[in-house]
Amino acid sequence: MEGYSLESIGNIPQLRYLGLTYTPTSELPEEIGRLNFLETLNLEKTGTKELPESMSQHTQLMCLFADKNTSATLDWKSDVHATVGDVPW
């Protein structure tokens, strides 16, 4: 993983907002799936290319902000207000 290591992020299960804007990290660890109460995730200007499969465990996620080159193959996309590269997902 380039940039900052986020592997310990799963140790904060009560986290509701995670703003990583301008934090250089090209990928998110699978441990992000343990953030059971995450409501908002902001990945703009991070260089994150793909969301991990563990993101599908986020039943509370309401807002996702990411760059236009970020991809996801997750079933919950239609249930989340997402903005990718200034365009709603």
Image (cartoon, grey):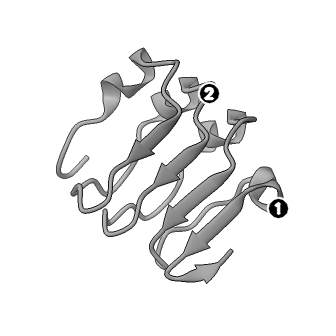
* Residue at x 31%, y 62% (from the top left corner): 46
Does the rendering let one see residue 52? Answer: no
Within-10-Å neighbours for mark 2: few <14, some 14–19, many 20+: some
Q: Position of residue 9 (x, y in %)?
A: 37, 27
| Count of numbered circles on the image | 2
Q: Amino acid at mark 2?
A: Phe
* Residue 30 in the image: above or below residue 53: above
Q: Position of residue 23 (x, y in %)?
A: 23, 55
* Residue 3 in the image: above or below residue 49: above
Residue that numbered label 1 is attached to: 78
* Residue 67 in the image: above or below residue 13: below
Q: Mark 2 or 1, which is nearer the eye?
A: 2
- Secondary structure, mark 1, is helix
Answer with the quarter of the image where residue 87 lies.
bottom right
Does the rendering let one see residue 62? Answer: yes
Q: Earlier in the sequence, mark 2 or mark 1?
A: 2
Answer with the quarter of the image where residue 39 lies.
top right
Q: Is residue 27 left or right of residue 5?
A: right
- Secondary structure, mark 2, is loop
- Observer-nearest residue: 78 or 54? 78
* Residue at x 64%, y 65% (from the top left corner): 82
Q: Position of residue 62 (x, y in %)?
A: 69, 49
Q: Amino acid at mark 1?
A: Ser
Mark pair 2, 1: CA separation: 19 Å
- Observer-nearest residue: 26 or 60? 60
Q: Quadrant of the C terminus?
A: bottom right
* Residue at x 49%, y 69% (from the top left corner): 70
* Residue at x 17%, y 50% (from the top left corner): 3
Q: Is residue 1 left or right of residue 43?
A: left
Residue that numbered label 2 is attached to: 37
Within-10-Å neighbours for mark 1: few <14, some 14–19, many 20+: few
Residue 6 is marked as: none
